[in-house]
Image (spheres, rainbow, N blue to C red):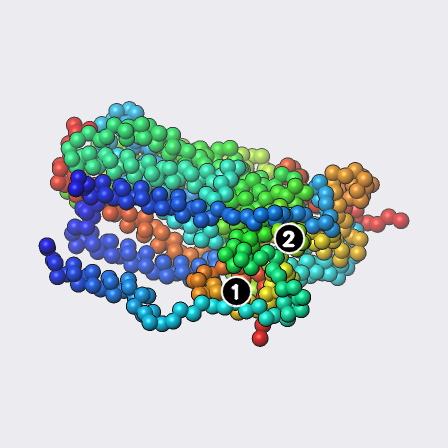
């Protein structure tokens, strides 16, 4: 035989590659004939979903709590006591820290001490989507920044990229920290990143996000690209701000601050 | 041959380990798992049918589930129109498992037999069964 | 040729087994991390990258620095580096391997690593980093191994490796540039959002990498019959001198921009790292040690007698390596996360399991390095090294 060890190893390597390519064929899907996928008929649609949070209408601690708990409950968001491992979809932060670029020692105390509801901004130009190496976080055509937990590799590049601290990582198994499970909705597993989804599962069945529903009118939700939508009308009438607009991320969450109520 | 004894002994030891699954099962009757369909939801059905024919579901269900997942999650297409033209809401937890509520008998036995560990259940809930 | 790694002195085997022991323990701890999640590390919601990613960043620099030996040898025909060019290339192989391992141990779902290839995403810098790092690993293995094999047989290296050598030069620059881009392109992380980041990375790489190589060469000379050569080491020392000064200059540029502009976002991370904020200052002593070591090393390297004296040169190289390890293997990544996007301070400190896993990866790299260097030295001890052979 005119084959030395080196030659043999080379051939063996090539054979392995060949088997690998052949094996890859196994993953090609066989789609059943005449089946189809369609968006649900009862869904809500928009060109770009946006949210308005009218902080003037949040009067008591209860107003915030109701919204946050409703969200965290239906989405099986665990309640982990250690702040390092916390998972949060929507929560409160004081004005000063939510809008650090608005630092001003003379703003009314009522504003300064006002808790602000913070969540994923579903940015028009989302840095998290730009950096994700697997498209696990991606932009839907309706402007929602979605997260595919099945694909997420847990590299946490998106967490470094998000200027709003909106993303949480599952540092440990979330299941033991879920008090009341919503059996209609999944949990997440160890090692993936999660965040607010603008309730895609509710939009699909014709309902607005749960926080909006529970806010008693203090939060609005609608199509930013539709000039006649409720959100556009409201934005046209009230002065609104967004978090860190100077970064050019184009957040889709608007805040009405207002301060003192005038009669 | 250098070290002939050692080489032969090595080969024998290797074969003992490598062939373990074969000789340890010789003479035992092969018993494939039988997934059970006797759940309350399925009993209620007049015509007992899955989203697609059984012949398709048995070998292809994993691929269908992955397609469902991608369609629902990534393309917001949460309705599946099957080969019979019927519409189903895409959801492992709320559609598949609604009928197949006997996960232990329906899913686990077969998966264990086939030596596969789908990670579906790391996140997707199954209602407690007795 | 690899069989040369299987015969060695007692000292060689002791080293190999110590390294294997560390790797073994670290592997067990990694299994625990795999089961319980990255919660066993000191990382948090606010400091979401820690020791693993900072080691990765630092080691990309060490890997890229091989180019500082390759350029004089291949582009400037500085024949004397023929003795050590392979040491640089194999150091790069070991460093890139560690980089990949650090990325891997940092992943929340490591079993899905192939999603990066299955769903290629060119807009993600991490995708490009995976591409350039694996390419660089392949280049250095091919170039180094073929050169050594040729030396072993007493023939010139195969012609097809020459273009690879030229490709490897810009490629080395690219791996560290792309790694810097991971950081410098993120809005809202002021500490990293600086155009000089890639340049600073390279300067730091070209000082810490050759400093390490110099130390390794001294070890090789002390414990084996192969002498990398005094003049060669002095040339490397000069490279380290220039690079460490440029690196410190770049650092001062950053300090000026933040300090003179007084823009809070730019100031905060520096404030945290060097003075502490609101009583939080775990990194403060380390950062000052890093500054002190850099200045000390610059002094030793700039003064010709202390650079020529191999004892003081060794001290200087250890100082350079330690200083830049603190700066890039710790402060740079952590500093970018503190304060967090809410301008709140949450500190980070590695935990014991995290440290053991980190040590395990370093041990793996060092094991690869030991084996590769062993092969090089065995070949050279047998053949005897002649510069004219190249």
Task: Check residue B107 in the rendering and tell me which mark sits there, or answer none.
Answer: 1
Q: In which quarter of the image is the C terminus of chain C?
A: top left
Of the pair C165 and C249, the residue shown nearer to us? C165
Q: Measuring from the top left, give residue A241's x and y in whole percent.
A: 73, 42
Task: Check residue C127 in the rendering and tell me which mark sits there, or answer none.
Answer: none
Q: Measuring from the top left, give residue A73's x and y in whole percent.
A: 66, 62
Q: Give the chain letter at badge 1.
A: B
Task: Check residue B84 in the rendering and tell me which mark sits there, or answer none.
Answer: 2
In the displayed structure, would residue B34 be above or below residue A112?
below
Quarter assignment of residue C301: top left
The residue at 59%/44% (across/down) is A138
Q: Give the chain letter at badge 2.
A: B
Q: Look at the image and tell me whether residue C52 can be seen.
A: no
Most extreme residue toward the top, as rendered?
A: C76
Of the pair C244 and A138, the residue shown nearer to us? A138
The residue at 79%/38% (across/down) is A227
Q: Measuring from the top left, give residue A212's x and y in whole percent.
A: 74, 53
The residue at 20%/37% (across/down) is C149
Q: In this view, does C259 lie to the left or right of C84?
A: right
Q: Is residue C264 left or right of residue C309?
A: right
Quarter assignment of residue A61: bottom right
Q: Counting other residues with Cα less than 10 Å from the Cα at mark 2, is it few (<14), some (14-19), or many (20 or more)?
A: few
Q: Measuring from the top left, give residue C9's x and y in whole percent.
A: 16, 52
Q: Quadrant of the N terminus of chain C?
A: top left
- Mark closer to the chain start, 2 or 1: 2
Q: Is mark 2 on a helix, strand or loop?
A: loop
How many marks on residues?
Answer: 2
Q: Look at the image and tell me whether residue B54 can be seen.
A: yes
The residue at 61%/70% (across/down) is B39
Q: What element carries label 1?
A: helix
In the displayed structure, would residue C360 be above or below residue C221?
below
Q: How far apart are marks 2 and 1 (CA)?
A: 25 Å
């Amino acid at each position: 035989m005119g084959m030395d060890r080196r030659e043999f190893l080379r051939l063996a390597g090539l054979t392995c590659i060949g088997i690998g390519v052949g094996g890859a064929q196994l993953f090609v899907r066989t789609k059943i004939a005449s089946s189809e996928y369609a968006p649900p008929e009862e869904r809500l649609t928009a060109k770009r979903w946006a949210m308005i949070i009218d902080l003037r209408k949040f009067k008591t601690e209860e107003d915030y709590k109701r919204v946050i708990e409703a969200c965290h409950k239906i989405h099986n968001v665990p309640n982990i006591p250690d702040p390092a491992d916390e998972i949060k979809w929507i929560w409160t932060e004081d004005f000063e820290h939510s809008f650090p670029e608005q630092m001003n020692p003379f703003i009314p105390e009522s504003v300064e001490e006002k808790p602000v509801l913070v969540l994923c901004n579903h940015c028009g130009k989302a840095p998290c989507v730009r950096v994700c190496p697997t498209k696990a976080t991606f932009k839907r055509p309706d402007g929602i920044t979605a997260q595919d937990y099945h694909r997420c590799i847990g590299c946490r590049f998106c967490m470094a990229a998000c200027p709003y601290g909106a993303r949480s990582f599952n540092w440990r198994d979330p299941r033991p920290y879920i008090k009341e499970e919503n059996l209609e909705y999944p949990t997440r597993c160890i090692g993936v990143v999660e965040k607010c989804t603008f309730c895609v599962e509710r939009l699909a069945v014709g309902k607005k996000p749960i926080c909006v529903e529970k806010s008693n009118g203090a939060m609005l939700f609608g199509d930013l690209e539709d000039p006649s939508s409720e959100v556009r009308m409201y934005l046209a009438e009230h002065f609104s701000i967004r978090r860190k607009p100077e970064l050019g991320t184009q957040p889709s969450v608007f805040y009405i601050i207002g301060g003192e109520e005038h009669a | 041959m250098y070290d002939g004894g050692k080489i032969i002994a090595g080969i024998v030891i290797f074969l003992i380990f490598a062939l373990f699954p074969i000789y340890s099962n010789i003479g035992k009757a092969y018993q494939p798992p039988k997934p059970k369909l006797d759940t309350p939801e399925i009993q209620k059905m007049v015509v007992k049918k899955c989203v697609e024919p059984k012949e398709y579901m048995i070998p292809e269900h994993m691929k269908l589930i992955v397609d469902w997942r991608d369609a629902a999650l990534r393309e917001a297409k949460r309705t599946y129109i099957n080969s019979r033209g019927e519409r189903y809401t895409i959801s492992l937890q709320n559609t598949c498992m609604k009928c197949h509520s006997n996960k232990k008998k329906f899913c686990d036995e077969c998966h264990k037999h086939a030596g596969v560990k789908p990670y579906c259940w790391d996140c997707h809930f199954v209602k407690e069964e007795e | 040729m690899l069989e040369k790694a299987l015969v060695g002195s007692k000292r060689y085997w002791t080293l190999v087994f110590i390294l294997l022991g560390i790797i073994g323990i670290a592997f067990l701890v990694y299994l625990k991390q795999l089961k319980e999640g990255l919660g066993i590390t000191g990382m948090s919601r606010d400091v979401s990258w820690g020791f693993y990613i900072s080691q990765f960043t630092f080691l990309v620099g060490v890997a890229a620095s091989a180019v500082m030996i390759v350029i004089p040898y291949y582009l400037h025909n500085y024949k004397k580096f023929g003795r050590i060019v392979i040491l640089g290339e194999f150091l790069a192989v070991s460093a890139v391997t560690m980089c990949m391992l650090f990325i891997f141990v940092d992943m929340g779902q490591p079993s899905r690593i192939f999603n990066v290839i299955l769903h290629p995403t060119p807009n993600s810098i991490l995708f490009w980093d995976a591409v350039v790092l694996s390419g660089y690993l392949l280049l250095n293995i091919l170039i180094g191994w073929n050169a050594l094999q040729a030396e072993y047989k007493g023939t010139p290296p195969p012609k097809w490796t020459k273009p690879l050598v030229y490709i490897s030069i810009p490629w080395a620059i690219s791996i560290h540039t792309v790694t810097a881009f991971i950081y410098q392109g993120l809005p809202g992380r002021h500490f990293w959002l600086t155009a000089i980041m890639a340049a600073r990375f390279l300067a730091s790489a070209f000082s810490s990498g050759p400093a390490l190589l110099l130390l390794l060469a001294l070890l090789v000379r002390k414990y084996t019959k192969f002498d990398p050569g005094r003049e060669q080491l002095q040339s490397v020392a000069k490279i380290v001198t220039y690079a460490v000064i440029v690196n410190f200059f770049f650092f001062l540029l950053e300090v000026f921009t933040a300090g003179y502009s007084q823009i809070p976002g730019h100031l905060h991370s520096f404030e945290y790292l060097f003075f502490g904020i609101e009583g939080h200052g775990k990194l403060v002593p380390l950062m000052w040690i890093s500054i002190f070591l850099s200045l000390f090393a610059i002094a030793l390297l700039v003064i010709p007698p202390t650079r020529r004296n191999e004892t003081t040169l060794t001290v200087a190289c250890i100082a350079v390596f330690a200083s830049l390890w603190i700066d890039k293997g710790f402060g740079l990544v952590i500093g970018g996360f503190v304060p967090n996007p809410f301008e709140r301070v949450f500190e980070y400190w590695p935990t014991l399991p995290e440290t053991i896993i980190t040590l395990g990866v370093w041990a793996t790299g060092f094991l690869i390095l030991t084996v590769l260097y062993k092969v090089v030295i065995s070949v050279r001890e047998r053949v005897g090294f002649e510069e004219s052979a190249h």
